[in-house]
Amino acid sequence: MKMTFRWYGSGDKVTLGDIRQIPCVKGVVSAIYDTPVGEVWSKESIAKLKADINAAGLEFEVVESVPVHEEIKLGGADAPRLIDNYKENVRRLGEAGVKCICYNFMPVFDWLRSELDRGLSDGSNALAYDHATVLSMNPLTSSLSLPGWDASYDNDGLKDLLARYADIDEEKLWDNLAVFLKEVIPVAEQSGVKMAIHPDDPPWGIFGLPRIITCKKNIARMLAIVDSPANGITLCTGSLGVNPDNDLADMARTFKGRIPFVHLRNIKITGEKCFEESGHRSSEGSLDMYEIIKALIDTGFDGYVRPDHGRMIWGEKGRAGYGLYDRALGAMYLDGIAEAIVKESEARR
Ligand code: DNO
């Protein structure tokens, strides 16, 4: 498995130089952030991003994300043009040597939390989710900005968008996902790119909006829409793992060959539909990271992994979940587990 680290571009407080010094990290996961969602990324900006990352001694083979425009998820009139733009982005990224593109199909909101800085008992702080609190935040009347909201929606824009989703139930969203996949996956195949859909985070519907990439059954359904290795998933342990019915090690085995990218992070379930993000170690949270990594390695996984959301530790201030220190600790821990599993299995041969 290839260890990578997410980097938000030249505006990120964490520098490429910082990332280069985390011993196990070989590559950077990034994106073009200054082009509006739905438009084509310029070849120059892709080439510059790659050159900057390579100049720091790191690889650039994973993009997270090429966002899917709401119009595509809604199956709106402009969807065909926007899908064409998406395909062009896949082609351009493939030409630049990108091997994996992470994206999601969550209506309106990406990942959602009720708190950005819940104090943990060790003095650090982390993202947390409390379902009752989230439900009490009506996006139509509240000016509160939840993490994961796309700040580019003004309140009116958001209201209009939510109104359009009133007609979109889960089956309609499945239909629109199928249209997208049938168009995009063949282009990904030709471009040497594996598409890796990110599960919905958290994996349940919110504010009446449908969410479908939530569990083993639904992931199997999405993989069957286009049965190709280019149609894969991002196995995000923290997103899926907040539902105790989701067995991540089982999913790693079941979806063997269809997992180009893994987000390895731990969460602690604190109640029904309530959780906080913990340090990466198995003993800190509800997920057994050893079992998950073992399932991946046992089934021949050779894709990309990255530590995900870290706590804020040692007084670090920065983008919630994306500081340097705790993610670096996480990367080293995960890499250590992988080294032990690989060596043990080699010794048994
Ligand atoms: C959160 C991330 C997600 C992810 C997107 C992929 O930290 O895991 O925002 O990047 O959902 O499209």
Image (spheres, rainbow, N blue to C red):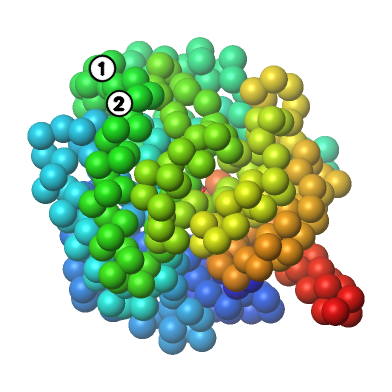
What residue is drawn where x is 44% and y is 29%? Answer: 211
x and y percentages locating residue 58 in the rendered image: 51, 81
Kind of residue indicated by mark 2: Lys
Residue under pointer 1? 167
x and y percentages locating residue 173 in the rendered image: 33, 30
What residue is drawn where x is 16% and y is 41%? Answer: 79
Q: Earlier in the sequence, mark 1 or mark 2?
A: 1
Kind of residue indicated by mark 1: Asp
Residue under pointer 2? 172
Graded by Cα atoms within 10 Å as few (under 14), some (14 to 19) or many (20 or more), the crowding at tag 2 reads: some
Name the element at disc 1. helix
If the image is split into quadrants, where does the N terminus sit?
A: bottom right
Q: Tell me whether the residue at label 1 lies in contact with that at label 2, contact meaning CB atoms closer than 8 angstroms.
A: yes
x and y percentages locating residue 301 in the rendered image: 63, 66
Name the element at disc 2. helix
Judged left or right of residue 101, residue 259 is: right
Judged left or right of residue 181, residue 309 is: right
Answer yes or no: is residue 330 visible. no
- Between marks 1 and 2, how big is the CA–CA gap? 8 Å
x and y percentages locating residue 193 in the rendered image: 37, 67
